Amino acid sequence: VSGLGDFPEVERTLIDVETADGLLSRRVGAEDLPAEYQAVAALLEAVRAPARPEELASTTETVTAMARVRSRTTMTTTPRRGRMQLTHVRRRTAALVAGALLAATAATATAALPDAAADAARTVLETLGISPPNATTPSGANERPSGSQAENGKGAEISELALTTELEGVEKGAAISTAASDGKSQAGQHGNAGAATPNAGGSETADAASGGASAKGTDVADAASGGASAAGAANAETHPAAAAAAGGQSHRP
Amino acid sequence: VALGARFESTLAGASAGAEWALAELYRDLHPALLRYLESQRPGEGEDLASETWIGIAEALHRFEGDEAAFRRFAFTIARRRLLDARRRQARRRTDVVPSAWFAGLGAPEESETEALAGLSTSAALARLADLPSDQAEVVLLRVLGGLDAREVALVTGKAPGTVRVLQHRALRRLASLLVQEGVTP
């Protein structure tokens, strides 16, 4: 067959694309077709003819083989829905863990950020329902111990400072006073004011400023150091230069 | 649609490995699959159909859909087996000639005297095999698979428009061949 031009009778009665589609899907019956296509319609019906017995001769063995495959497959695979649910749970768990780690990291980072960046980060975290730590207070400062426990803690801190500082004289007293008053005492920073009672004023002011913690710290320091802690204060009182330097240094909170 | 309302329960049974359900699917679809494969690879249809059914059994738990989708699923697997066979043949570089071809050599006049009223399925499939392979495949999938042009496009990886053009040309060519041979219904 060289082409449709060899068969002018077929050329004259070409069916369109829609009719061809209808013929294949049985929407168009043979009676609606040109005579040249009646044979085509009959041929397609022959192709669709019911099954012949010989075509189903191997039913039993094929079905047995299929059942064997199915039982093997059923034993070795989780049903699809089950696998999907398992995957879903795994993904959700991974997302929760990742979210928690991210939140913890973000909260920690926020506390260490500069003010402007910390504010922005805090806003974002609060939007997500996460409470970041307060950037203006050092870590752990949000939960301050109260009562005597707090005072003892501070006393121990002052005692430690008194025992370990390499400062001497006025500087040592000023450092202890400053620490005891949480920085309110400015002892040693303003020169000699020529006050008659140089050291006592600083101590009193430090005591007042620290709510007595300074005095307790000194007591604890004395007790812990076997009196060595008092050396700084004594030096401040007995050494002329130190006494002069310490005079009036702690008269202002 | 042959199984209709029974399809869902049959599929569930087949997926669980019940032989009655597998047999029902097989009896419903096997003749069409066998004719499609035999027409495309004469002499290898039975083997390819067996491979196809094993492939269906292996993938049954992944299938979700209605009866029409199942037919598409089955013919997609059959077509893959067909392509595998073609690749194997390309490596082998030999052609398998079915015995029916030799049997037909001695009686050339049969086709001329054959009336379509008595045209056997085998003879009809042989006529389709005279078409170019892409046209024959499209017609077989439409007629045996019961697939529409869009579904044939999905199975073959062609555009739906291409499928429509191929099937149109196939029918025109068939009409020409039958007129030339003087075959009338």
Image: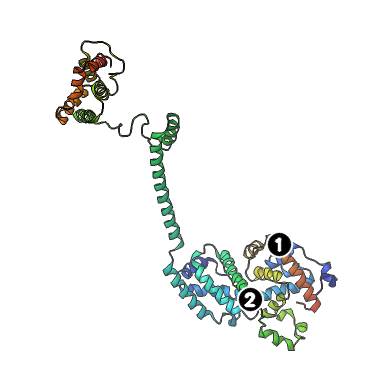
Task: Say which amino acid is labelled 1.
Answer: Thr
Taking A114 as reference, is B179 above or below it? below
Horizontal side of B98 relative to A17 (left or right) equals left
Residue in the foreground of this view, choosing between A202 and B25: A202
Tell me the quarter of the image containing the N terminus of chain A. Answer: bottom right
The outermost residue toward the front is A240
Q: Residue at x 44, y 54 (%)?
A: A88
Picture coordinates of residue B145, whole percent (x, y): 62, 69
Residue in the foreground of this view, choosing between B35 and A74: A74
Horizontal side of B30 relative to A104 (left or right) equals right
Q: Quadrant of residue B169?
A: bottom right
Q: CA gap, disc 2 to disc 1?
A: 29 Å
Taking A100 as reference, is A90 above or below it? below
**Mark 1 lies on residue:** B162
Q: Chain of mark 2?
A: B
Image disc number at residue A86: none
Q: Quadrant of residue A46?
A: bottom right
**Mark 2 lies on residue:** B91
Residue in the foreground of this view, choosing between B126 and A201: A201
The outermost residue toward the bottom is B106
